[in-house]
């Protein structure tokens, strides 16, 4: 976790902290659409939160392990697609 994310997490702003972590993996050319991405990120966080509340209330259609796996799969794919490449070809 970067220093900005750590500070935000201490303030109880966990979703914003996660956004700053994800934002660091985006290419520099993404500046024009970062605000739209942030909006989508928070909308997704809201959806996941509602799903987690449903699971906590006993909704058998919502499995936290499936949410965890889906998010991990996304992050793995995103990092592979957008991580800086070392060296030159």
Image (spheres, rainbow, N blue to C red):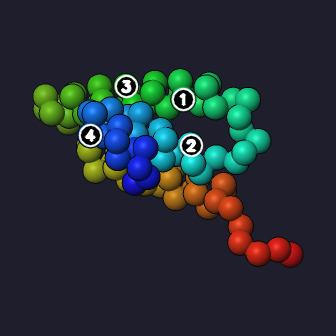
Tag in front: 4 or 3: 4
Query: Is residue 31 placed above or below 28 in the rendered structure?
Result: above
Q: Earlier in the sequence, mark 2 or mark 4?
A: 4
Residue 57: percent from left, percent from top: 13, 28
Can you tell which quarter of the image residue 83 is in? bottom right
Q: Mark 3 — residue?
A: 46
Q: Are marks 4 and 3 in contact (CB under 8 Å)?
A: no
Tag in front: 2 or 3: 2
- Seen from the viewer's position, the closer of residues 48 and 29 is 29
Q: Mark 1 — residue?
A: 38
Residue ID at (69%, 29%): 33
- How far apart marks 2 and 3 lie (CA) works out to 18 Å
Q: Are marks 1 and 2 in contact (CB under 8 Å)?
A: yes
- How far apart marks 4 and 3 lie (CA) works out to 20 Å
Q: Mark 4 — residue?
A: 10
Query: Is residue 79 placed above or below 33 in the rendered structure?
Result: below
Please say whether residue 22 is visible from this viewpoint: yes
- How far apart marks 2 and 4 lie (CA) works out to 19 Å
Q: Are marks 1 and 3 in contact (CB under 8 Å)?
A: no
The quarter of the picture where the C terminus appears is bottom right
Query: Is residue 30 placed above or below 42 in the rendered structure?
Result: below
Asked which secondary structure carries label 3, the reply is helix
Q: Earlier in the sequence, mark 1 or mark 4?
A: 4
Residue 39: percent from left, percent from top: 53, 24
Horizontal side of residue 57 vs 13, given as left or right: left
Asked which secondary structure carries label 4, the reply is helix
Horizontal side of residue 86 vs 4, given as left or right: right
Tag in front: 1 or 4: 4
Q: Mark 2 — residue?
A: 23
């Amino acid at each position: 976790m970067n220093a900005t994310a750590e500070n935000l997490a201490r303030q109880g702003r966990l979703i914003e902290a996660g956004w700053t972590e994800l934002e660091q993996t985006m290419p520099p050319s993404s500046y024009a659409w970062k605000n739209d991405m942030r909006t989508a990120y928070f909308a997704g966080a809201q959806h996941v939160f509602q799903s987690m509340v449903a699971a906590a209330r006993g909704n058998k259609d919502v499995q936290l392990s499936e949410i965890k796996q889906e998010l991990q799969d996304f992050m793995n794919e995103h990092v592979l697609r957008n991580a800086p490449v070392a060296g030159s070809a």
